[in-house]
Image: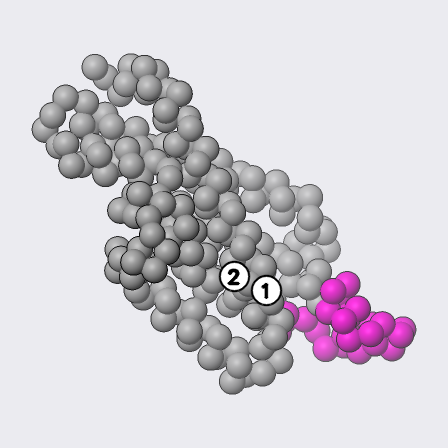
Amino acid sequence: MNLFDYVADRWDRLSLQAWLHVSEVVQSTIIAAVLGVLIGVAVYRSPIGSALATALASTILTVPSFALLGLLIPVVGLGATPTVIALVLYALLPITRNTIVGLGGVDPAIRDAARGIGMSRVGVLARVELRLAWPAILAGMRVATQMLMGIAVIAAYAKGPGLGGEVFSGLVRAGSANATNQALAGTLGVVILALLLEAVYFLIARFTVSRGIRG
């Protein structure tokens, strides 16, 4: 059986796994974006705070996926929970760092002008600074999403949802019938989904970043 026939015969199962894979990555990215932006807002005016937040997020990224999942499983069990926690932790670095960079790059003159017309500190942050920092934040989210697409495959170790189960099952059954097709179907599925999400980010940037900011 060739790869095309394998996918066609198992389309229902593969499409469900693909949906679960995308769903866990997107949800984890959104959660990480909320946390990363909040952290960035809290520390971007402090060089020490910014350096500390970036260093902590970088440290998390140095922990191997298998090791982090292995530490989480005894605490929260198997399934989606350890997977989402691990993905959120891994996504924090690019989002937090880009939030700090984006907010720090706002021209002080623009802040002063906004305050000069009577805007509050919160108003300046929400209506001026975050809008100008949005392209950098979105770029951090895009990098995080692409990174998580691959890491989510490892989540099969914790019985997490997604295409990782196909990849791992195919590798474990190497040499048996359809083992190669199974591993390839999972791997190519992740690649295709990553490309589709990249296109989604392009459209989001197209419709949410003004031409003036895009330069």
Q: Mark 2 to mark 1: distance in Å?
A: 7 Å
Residue at the (33%, 48%) spot, across then down? 78
Residue 3, x across and y down, in percent: 26, 20
Q: Residue at x 11, y 25 (%)?
A: 176
Number of residue marks: 2
Which quadrant of the figure has residue 14? top left
Tell me which residue sits at (48%, 79%) in the image.
51
Look at the image and say whether residue 193 sits in the magenta stretch.
no
Of callouts 2 and 1, which one flags the residue occurring earlier in the amino acid sequence?
1
Name the kind of residue labelled 1 in the image: Val
Residue 139 appears anywhere in the view: no
Q: Which sits in the foreground, 116 or 183?
A: 183
Indicate whether 92 appears above or below 194: below
Q: Nearer the viewer, residue 12 or 195?
A: 12
- Viewer-closest of 48 and 87: 87
Q: Residue at x 59, y 64 (%)?
A: 37
Quarter placement of the C terminus: bottom right
Q: Position of residue 101 (x, y in %)?
A: 56, 69
Dot 2 and dot 1 residues touching (CB under 8 Å):
yes
Q: Residues within 10 Å of mark 1 (few under 14, many from 20)?
A: many
The amino acid on which the numbered mark 2 sits, given as a three-letter code, is Ile
The local crowd at label 2, few if under 14, some if 14 to 19, many if 20 or more residues have their Cα within 10 Å, is many
Q: Which residue is mark 2?
A: 95
Tell me which secondary structure the magenta stretch mostly adopts: helix
Q: Quadrant of residue 79?
A: top left
Helix, strand or loop under label 2: helix
**Which residue bears the numbered disc 1?**
37
Specify start and end residues of the magenta stretch as a single range: 103-128
